[in-house]
Image (spheres, rainbow, N blue to C red):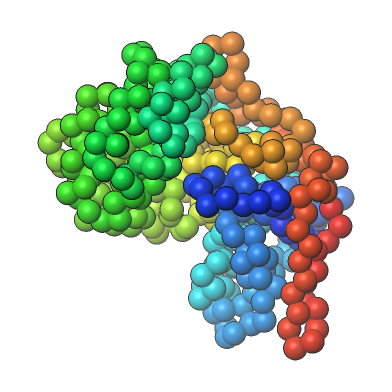
Amino acid sequence: MNIESVDFFYLSMPEVLNIGDGSQDALLVRVRAGGLEGWGECEASPLTSIASYVCPMSHSACKPVKYSVEGMPLNSKEDIYNVSNTVRHNSSDLLQTDHTLSGIDIALWDILGKKFNEPVYKLLGYKKAYPKLPYASQLFGDTPEETFLKAKTAKQSGFKAVKFGWGPFGKQTLHSDIAHLTAAREGVEDGIYLMIDAGAAWSNSVTAANDRLPPLCKIKAYWLEEPFANMELGSYKKLSESVPGVALAGGEGCHNFVQAAAMIKHAGLKFIQIDAGRIGGITVAKQVADLAQVNNITYVNHTFTSHLALSASLQPFAGIEKDFFSEYPVELKSLAKDITQNKIVPDSDGYIHVPEQPGLGITVDVQSLKKYVVDVEIKVRGKIIYHSPKL
């Protein structure tokens, strides 16, 4: 079979707030081939990614992503690898390429799984999928009191691991940050993994990050995530060697394999966090997971949107037993919740499981999404080159 069509759907909440919450809009990708339909999700600016798919060619290395996708064969995983490589070759100077490719790649794996009646993780070479321990991923509260209540709620909900990030943390005073850290630990109490995400608040300032290490140690933070901007390798490495020390996590900002490899080899990380919807899809995320094993780095999925994205993010490391943490956003906007009919929910022991159904094992709720569709039309020289397809 060949790839017959690729459709993008720009979805959005009525109001998008200036907060670190990626569930406020979405870009879904629907691919059709051989009578089958696959779905993917890009972790990217929707309108920008749509434009990269249809934009006029600038030169031989700056073709629209569409040039390398539609009409291509899709009968094996090698065909998906070929699409991935061809897109990068033909669109290497188009900087949105990997973000746009991500959703397409995810949808291609979804279709291939349905074709062979296998879950994606088996197509990737894993014999079985191991349970993952979800950490309740959420933003810091506006006040320490709010952070405490959020932490307490997560504990009462049965989560054995909790992560706080973004919000005011790292943007105010050291005293304020300590208050939030203390509130988070007091809310979840002892015996629960507590992770902290600085949201790259300190850019490349090792001094600012160092100041937070003692209080992070005091609350027994399991890791400090993204203290610096992506690829600030020197700052990451220097902080990783600081005393007292906290394990560092990072990598969600990587949008290709080379960046992820550099973070693994040179940043002093203990945890590499990869978003399949950003790095180029499941194909590249699996390559990073393999490299992480060789370098004794723990692979963790990054996801902060729908359960379609959650399933996609789990596939690349589903068969790695020792890498058992999974990000699990608990404050999703209604849009992200409505994307899928079925959800991946913790079992009675607090673990989540990769779907065993063919493909990603997730059903998109088309009817529920119609109210979120943003109508888009792109016109060049008076000719319409893109308009929103029917959902």
**Residue 83 placement, left or right of 4:** left
Q: State the residue in front, 303 or 182.
A: 182
Q: Which residue is rendered at x = 59% and y = 60% of the image? A: 45
Q: Residue furthest top?
A: 348
Q: Can residue 242 be seen?
A: yes
Q: Position of residue 332 (x, y in %)?
A: 61, 37
Q: Which residue is rendered at x = 63% and y = 23% of the image? A: 345
Please identify the quarter of the rendering in which residue 300 is found. Answer: top left
**Residue 127 placement, left or right of 240:** right
Q: State the residue in front, 114 or 158.
A: 158
Q: Can residue 250 be seen?
A: no
Q: Which residue is rendered at x = 34% and y = 55% of the image? A: 229
Q: Which residue is rendered at x = 54% and y = 79% of the image? A: 61
Q: Where is residue 102 in the image (x, y as percent from the top left)?
A: 59, 55
Q: Position of residue 281 (x, y in %)?
A: 57, 51
Q: Residue furthest bottom?
A: 381
Q: Where is residue 387 in the image (x, y as percent from the top left)?
A: 80, 69
**Residue 79 placement, left or right of 99:** right
Q: In this view, does 58 lie above or below 359?
A: below
Q: Which residue lies furthest to the left in this view?
A: 243
Q: Which image quadrant: the N terminus?
A: bottom right
Q: State the residue in front, 205 or 267.
A: 205
Please identify the quarter of the rendering in which residue 182 is found. Answer: top left
